[in-house]
């Protein structure tokens, strides 16, 4: 991951925001958690689709970061369920897919499911936070 200069890191301070990280790979959870902590973004972690939806329905999140390939529900299925939420604020929560897939047909299906943005792994620290900043500003 690339380094962010101290001046740039100030623009990425999300200390009043909360994310839902949906990821089943322990290494990816560790890496993304380190980034989220570094920039003071509060977050919960769900390792399955069912756990993610339970957390989403009982908490308020400013953004959802989801892997695509998950146990129980895929990330695009989770996006469709979120978009169908009866609470307009929850239904419009930005959803960022974190995936190793870069095929344009797959990316188009993710966007069609209601995912706002797709970050292809591996991504840089700067790209990660620029994408989050875009959706939280």
Image (cartoon, grey):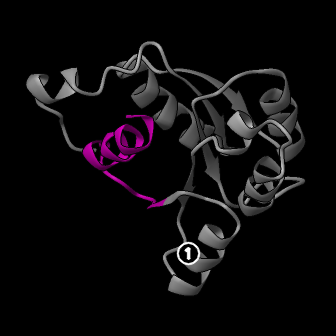
Q: Is residue 63 above or below residue 9?
A: below
In the image, 92: left or right of 3?
Answer: right
- Residue 135 sits in quarter: top left
- Residue 11 sits in quarter: top left
Is residue 100 located in the magenta-colored stretch of the structure? no
Residue at the image position 40 percent from the left and 57 percent from the top: 122
Is residue 127 located in the magenta-colored stretch of the structure? yes
Q: Callout 1: few (<14), some (14-19), or many (20+) C-alpha neighbours within 10 Å? A: some
Nearer-the-camera pick, 57 or 118: 57
Number of numbered labels in the structure image: 1
Residue under pointer 1: 107
In the image, 74: left or right of 23?
Answer: right
Nearer-the-camera pick, 82 or 107: 82
User: Which secondary structure lies at badge 1?
Assistant: helix
Q: Which residues are magenta?
A: 118-137
Q: Quadrant of the N terminus?
A: top left
Q: Quadrant of the C terminus?
A: top left
Residue at the image position 30 percent from the left and 49 percent from the top: 127
Residue at the image position 80 percent from the left and 37 percent from the top: 52
- Residue 85 sits in quarter: top right
- Looking at the picture, how far across and down is residue 81, in whole percent? 83, 52
- Looking at the picture, how far across and down is residue 113, in whole percent? 71, 67
Q: Is residue 36 above or below residue 109?
A: above
């Amino acid at each position: 991951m690339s380094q962010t200069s101290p001046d740039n890191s100030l623009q990425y301070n999300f200390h009043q925001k909360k994310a839902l990280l949906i990821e089943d790979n322990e290494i990816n959870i560790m890496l993304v958690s380190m980034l989220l902590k570094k920039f003071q973004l509060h977050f919960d972690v769900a390792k399955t689709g069912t756990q993610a939806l339970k957390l989403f329905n009982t908490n308020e999140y400013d953004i959802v970061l989801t892997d695509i390939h998950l146990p129980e529900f895929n990330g695009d299925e989770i996006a469709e369920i979120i978009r169908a939420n009866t609470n307009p604020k929850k239904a419009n929560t930005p959803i960022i897919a974190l995936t190793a897939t870069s095929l344009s047909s797959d990316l188009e299906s993710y966007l069609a499911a209601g995912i706002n943005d797709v970050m292809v792994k591996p991504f840089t620290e700067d790209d990660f936070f620029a994408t989050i900043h875009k959706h939280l500003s």
